[in-house]
Image: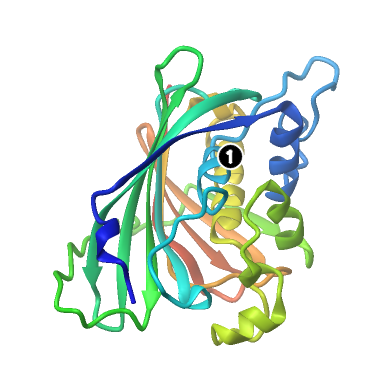
């Protein structure tokens, strides 16, 4: 049963710190081979942190977010947005606060929306903000609002970019080293409890892979140009799947969709925002 007392409650602040090594570990976890993301000592190449590492620092890591007495194997990541107020450095510290802003009744389940705000621990200036939605299967029907239903549609034309990335069979096992130890992505027994045939890839790993490919396609590899990213998770990815990212440019915004090679859409209604 959901603990509705969590609605509106502010958790934190707590401190999250990271090093250059953490940035490298995250980059490898999302399949990076680009020297700027995957090395710190290549001649003439300055190390960069991938912007989506901000989510690895603050989502699904300690302190754990608790929704009540619910079956964790039935919780799915539904939506994710990220706003960067400044480029994410390769090392640093932030003070983090988290708040459940909405609990919606979707009938077959409940959708819990949470917001995270992080400020630079040294300057007190805003660093990044993120909004995530978790879908709790079987927890709906409590009589609450269904909430808004809006989708970002992709343009009705051929994509301006099409990128592919073959995830590794151990992709989830590498990505989990950045902090997300949810057994849904590593333990076959736990995954089976949630009705899955095998452990699935972290949604935020697919999200990070997608961001990395889009930075290469539209920002010439410069992660500092990313100011925001959003998308809706629509299907699981199995480690070993080929991912296909199709994207459409509209000035400084990039609409995108991520699918498997078989055509199953796994991130829909995606939007990446860039500075010029």
- Can you identify the residue that label 1 sits on? 53
Is residue 151 visible in the rendered structure shown here?
A: no
Task: Specify the quadrant that holds the N terminus.
Answer: bottom left
Indicate the position of residue 200 as horizontal and vertical percent values: 63, 72
- Taking the spot 61% from the left edge, 37% from the top edge, the residue there is 216
Display colour scheme: rainbow
Left or right placement of residue 174 versus residue 242 in this view: right
Q: Is residue 103 above or below residue 62?
A: below
Q: Residue at point 30% right, 73% down?
A: 110
Residue at the image position 61 percent from the left and 55 percent from the top: 205
* Rendered position, 172 above or below 58: below
* Total tally of numbered discs in the picture: 1
> Looking at the figure, which quarter contains the C terminus?
top left
Residue at screen point 58% across, 48% down? 208
Residue 34 screen position, x and y as percent: 75, 36
Number of other residues with Cα within 10 Å of mark 1, as a class: few under 14, some 14 to 19, many 20 or more:
many
11, 21: nearer the viewer: 11
Q: In screen coordinates, is 151 left or right of 157?
A: left
Report the side of 63 relative to 126 (left or right).
Answer: right
Q: Of helix, strand and loop, which one carries label 1?
A: helix
Residue 178 place in picture, x, y as percent: 68, 47
The image shows residue 122, relative to residue 32, as above or below, that is above
Which image quadrant for residue 228? top left
Query: Picture coordinates of residue 45 (x, y %)?
Result: 76, 19
* Nearer to me, 190 or 228: 190
Q: Would residue 81 be visible to someone looking at this image?
A: yes
């Amino acid at each position: 049963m959901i603990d509705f007392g969590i609605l509106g409650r502010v958790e934190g602040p707590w401190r999250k710190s990271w090093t250059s090594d953490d940035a490298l570990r995250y980059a490898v976890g999302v399949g990076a081979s680009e020297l700027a993301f995957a090395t710190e000592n290549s001649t003439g190449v300055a190390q960069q942190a991938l912007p989506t590492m901000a989510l690895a620092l603050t989502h699904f890591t300690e302190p754990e977010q608790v929704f009540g007495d619910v079956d964790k194997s039935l919780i799915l990541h539904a939506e994710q947005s990220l706003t960067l107020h400044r480029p994410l450095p390769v090392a640093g510290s932030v003070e983090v606060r988290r708040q459940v802003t909405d609990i919606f009744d979707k009938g077959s389940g409940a959708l819990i929306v949470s917001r995270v705000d992080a400020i630079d621990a040294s300057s007190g200036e805003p660093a990044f903000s993120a909004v995530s939605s978790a879908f709790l299967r079987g927890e709906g029907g409590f009589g609450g609002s269904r909430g808004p239903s809006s989708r970002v549609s992709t343009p009705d034309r051929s994509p301006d970019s099409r990128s592919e990335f073959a995830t590794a069979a151990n992709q989830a096992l590498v990505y989990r080293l950045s902090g997300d130890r949810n057994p849904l992505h590593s333990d076959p027994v736990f995954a089976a409890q949630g009705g899955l045939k095998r452990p699935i890839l972290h949604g935020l790993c697919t999200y990070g892979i997608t961001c990395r490919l889009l930075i290469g396609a539209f920002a010439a590899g410069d992660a500092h140009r990313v100011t925001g990213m959003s998308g809706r998770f629509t299907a699981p990815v199995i480690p070993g799947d080929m991912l296909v990212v199709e994207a459409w440019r509209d000035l400084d915004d990039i609409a995108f969709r991520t699918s498997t090679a078989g055509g199953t859409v796994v991130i829909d209604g995606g939007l990446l925002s860039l500075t010029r």
